[in-house]
Image (tube, rainbow, N blue to C red):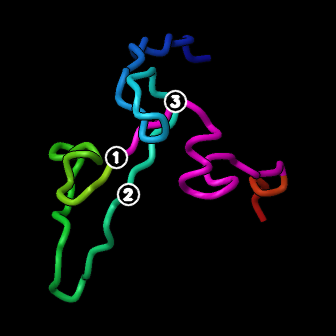
């Protein structure tokens, strides 16, 4: 049986909330990654595990920070930050 490993402590970040315009602790993030054209238009570079980048380092990505669920869902639609999965969705057929 494997040993239990502790999760690393990630210090909470504080950014300007898109909803209220004040600096608060970030609880919800919204990433908009623009579509890319595989036919020769804007092309994202291919990644290997050694050269992997953060999502925010990809050119054209927009990151929006929110501190409340109500503000995030008001901006992006009702239920957009809530998972509605059931146990049946994870059963293998």
Q: Mark number for residue 32?
A: 2
Q: Residues within 10 Å of mark 1 (few under 14, many from 20)?
A: few
79, 16: nearer the viewer: 16
73, 46: nearer the viewer: 73
Q: Residues within 10 Å of mark 2 (few under 14, many from 20)?
A: few
Rendered residue at 41%/27% (across/down): 22
Vertically, is 71 above or below 61? above
Asked whether disc 1 touches disc 2, contact meaning CB atoms under 8 Å apart, the reply is yes
Closer to the camera: disc 1 or disc 3? 3
Check disc 1 and report the residue beneath it: 63
Q: Earlier in the sequence, mark 1 or mark 2?
A: 2
SS class, disc 1: strand
Magenta segment boundaries in residue numbering:
64-87
Mark 1 and mark 2: span between their CA atoms? Answer: 6 Å
Q: Is residue 61 magenta?
A: no
Left or right, residue 7 beside residue 52: right
Q: Mark number for residue 30?
A: none
Left or right, residue 88 beside residue 50: right
Q: In the picture, which quadrant includes the C terminus?
A: bottom right
Rendered residue at 26%/45% (across/down): 56
| Residue 2 at x, y percent in the picture | 56, 17
Q: Earlier in the sequence, mark 2 or mark 3?
A: 2
Mark 2 and mark 3: span between their CA atoms? Answer: 18 Å
Mark 1 and mark 3: span between their CA atoms? Answer: 14 Å
84, 1: nearer the viewer: 84
Check disc 3 and report the residue beneath it: 67
Vertically, is 10 above or below 63? above
SS class, disc 3: loop
């Amino acid at each position: 049986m494997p040993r239990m490993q502790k999760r690393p402590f990630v210090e909470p970040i504080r950014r300007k909330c898109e909803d209220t315009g004040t600096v608060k602790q970030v609880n919800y993030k919204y990433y908009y990654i623009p579509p890319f054209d595989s036919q020769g238009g804007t092309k994202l570079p291919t990644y290997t595990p050694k050269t992997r980048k953060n999502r925010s380092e990809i050119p054209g990505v927009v990151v929006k920070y929110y501190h409340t669920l109500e503000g995030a869902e008001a901006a992006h639609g009702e239920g957009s930050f809530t998972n509605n999965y059931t146990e049946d969705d994870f059963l293998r057929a």
